[in-house]
Amino acid sequence: MRTDMDTTHMTDEAAGTQTMQATARYEYGDADQVHERTVARPDIAADQVLVRVRAAGVDRGTWHLMTGEPYAMRLFTGLRKPSQPILGLDVAGTVVAVGADVARFQPGDEVFGIASGSFAEYAAADEAKLAFKPRRLSWEQAAVAPVSGGTALQALTDAGGLEAGQRVLVIGASGGVGTYAVQLAKALGAHVTGVCSTSKLDLVRRIGADRVVDYTRDDYLDGSSAYDLILDIGGRNPVAQIRRALTPAGTLVIVGGEDGGRLTGGMGRQLGALAMSPFHGHTVKNLIQKEHYSHLERLAEHLQSGAVVPAIERTIGLSGVADALRDLGAGRVRGKIAVVVRDDE
């Protein structure tokens, strides 16, 4: 949607730019369809801002948007082909234009948050999905925080009700959400056990886990250790098996799940877990992330204090996005990958 130019505050740079470089695909599929392209610069609605993207983050949600799986998500993203060809969700950059109804930002503000189509030189973002960038963070650090960090924070606090002194188990501790979950749980006063594969043990130790378990060697769900809160990010263990590791009044938060059919993916497992929850003493919750600046501002406090530091495996340019998505889908990524869009300042 185009905003009336008379009611939009825009920098001279933005006004004079009609095209941009972006990483896009026009059909659902694998990373072979993802390429850097010249596309039209996005317009903004009255409640949006135009961000000059400095960096973006590669996350699991973007991988799903690329593949169009599970198929149920296409009800919202386009049935036959993606309604948004440009990939990317995480964003960090400078505001260059604001819509008529925008009150929280003005051109020149440094922001981070969520913008559909962030793998591009410019991205349109809803005002409600952006917050001011924490000053101590680099552009790359800020860019990889919103989706994964926001998910971890909401899983621990909003869904999990975490309290200081509790024992927390993070299944999938070396991934994007997991690396934030370990650090945030520690910052909130929990004793944290992180679960990951052999090659990623050092990372999970380095970010502060009190105990690290190699799932390829140890049965961490045998009931020998009990946890007040378990975050299941990996989604590959049967829910009944996970429950054995909970305290009698413990809580399981199902954050994600990559197993399942192409139709519903991990959603079938999540719905089944909820259906059985009333018949047990445990609390089982599925997390649905809310994309709102209030959560970003809470996350920013931990980032600004230094209690949480984004774990960036590597940085790439727009031309490297396809390979990054291949690695993410294959489980080869430790922490996060940042996409540097502009490094000229």
Image (tube, rainbow, N blue to C red):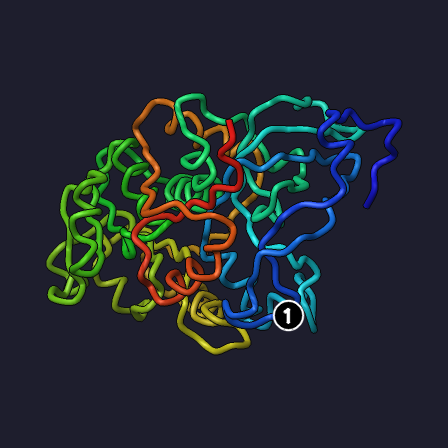
Q: Quadrant of residue 115?
A: top right
Looking at the image, which residue is at 56% across and 25% down? 110
Q: Nearer the viewer, residue 339 or 296?
A: 339
- Could you say which is closer to the camera, residue 117 or residue 237? 117
> Quick one: 163 or 40, which is closer to the camera?
40
Give the number of callouts: 1
x and y percent of residue 139 in the render? Answer: 46, 32
Task: Report whether residue 268 is seen.
Answer: yes
Residue 243, by quadrant, is: bottom left
Q: Is residue 55 left or right of residue 223?
A: right
- Residue flagged by tag 1: what amino acid is it? Glu
Tag 1 secondary structure = loop
Q: Does 185 appear above or below 278?
A: above
Q: Is residue 240 left or right of residue 258?
A: left
Estimate the x, y position of residue 298 in percent, counting from the top left: 46, 29
Mark 1 surroundings within 10 Å by alpha-carbon count, few (fewer than 14), some (14 through 19), many (20 or more): some
Q: Which residue is at 22% across, 50% downward?
A: 194
Rendering coords of residue 57 (x, y %): 47, 46
Q: Residue at x 66, y 33 (%)?
A: 127
- 320 relative to 81, above or below: above
Residue linked to disc 1:
27
- On screen, residue 324 versus residue 41, left or right, reads left
Q: Residue furthest front?
A: 344
- Which of the 4 image quarters holds residue 126? top right
At 32% from the left edge and 36% from the top edge, which residue is drawn?
A: 184
**Whole-percent x and y of residue 232?**
33, 57
| Horizontal relation, residue 182 to residue 125: left or right | left
Q: Look at the image and tell me whether residue 278 can be seen.
A: no
